[in-house]
Amino acid sequence: MAQGSNTMDTRFLQSFIYVVETGSIAAAARRLDLTPASVAQRIKALETDVGSQLIVRAGRTVKPTLAGNRILQHAHTVLNEVRDLRSVASETSLPAGPLRLGATPTGLTQILPGVLKQWVLAHAHIEIYIEPAPSTVLYQRLLNGHLDAAVMVHPLFDLPKSCAWHGLRKEPLTLVTPSTMLVSDPIKTLATEPFIRYDRQVVAGKLADDYLRHHGVRPRVRFELDGIESIGKLVAEGLGISVLPDWNVGGPPDFAIKRWALPPPHMEREVGIVWTRAGVRAQLAQTLVALAAPLFKLESVTGPS
């Protein structure tokens, strides 16, 4: 875009969004695979086009000005509309990509590899952009229109009718200990051994906390954190025990840790794919679900069709 042009380049809007999201021109440049100087030039050109300064340096970071904050949501809207326009312009039976797909860390490692292998075999010409994040973040980004679909944990509330859900698998809560520990009474073990608590702000962590309360257990909490794989590694190092969803359902065993069934009540989280029904790329999300369903035993779709 030439200086003073009446045509705004959407790439410059994307650069502005990345600078705001990362708080750094250098970090935005890495995401865009550009030099920091190129990103700075884009921001300057955008500022010239709109006639206002959009970012300002604050210490070692940059932040949006008042004008920058005002146009930020509009910038997202413009980029979403441009993506939608390109998708509906497809000359095939499916919308053009990319499908913007969010996934939790365990979704990336335990669910998506097999599904993406099927996608490449069937639709290699349609790109998928994958964004890793916790379920709570993915859900908000889906509602805000930044994602088309997400592999995530079903929240502890009903999804709005604007969203469709397809469950892929249920993961029961299980006691996780070092492989060398012998457990005869899981409840007694939970009450006496050092405990690594799964973050209570996430679904499985809240379920685990409810389970402990049900049995009147006040665990000897040593750490509390989000991240099933991270907690599993701490357990494997002998730093404590935990209550986690059985994230390796159908996967290879981890010989450094051992899982023990918990007495009732049986609690479980459900992992699946959620997408927006009215989205331009909803058909791509449904196509992804159709490829995923045969790979998993759970095939329950909730909500109105």
Image (cartoon, grey):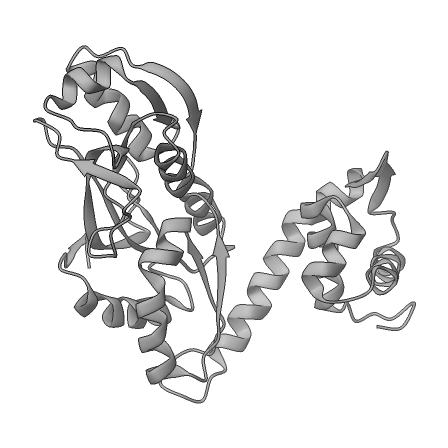
- Residue 246 seen in render: yes
When asked about the image quadrant of residue 301, the answer is bottom left
Residue at screen point 54% across, 74% down: 85
Residue at image location 14% in from the left, 56% down from the top: 298
In x, y percent, where is residue 228? Answer: 37, 40
Q: Residue 305's spot in the image, x, y percent?
A: 19, 59
Outermost residue, front side:
180
Question: How many labels were placed on the picture?
Answer: 0
**Residue nearest the viewer, comparing 192 with 273:** 192
In this picture, residue 45 sits left or right of residue 73: right
Up/down of 51 relative to 8, above or below: above
Q: Is residue 263 above or below residue 144?
A: above
Residue 50 placement (x, y as % from top left): 83, 56
Q: Can you give x and y, in whole percent of width and height, for residue 170 in the image?
A: 18, 47
Against 282, residue 250 (above or below) is: above
Q: Position of 133 compared to 27: left or right?
A: left
Q: Could you tell me which quadrant the N terminus lies in? A: bottom right
Identify the residue at horizontal 76%, vertical 60% (top origin). 29
Residue 150 visible, this angle: no
Q: Is residue 247 left or right of residue 140?
A: left
Up-down: is 114 above or below 62?
Answer: below
Q: Residue furthest bottom?
A: 91
Q: Quadrant of residue 176?
A: top left
Q: Nearer the viewer, residue 240 or 79?
A: 240
Q: Is residue 127 left or right of residue 94?
A: right
Q: Nearer the viewer, residue 62 or 283?
A: 62
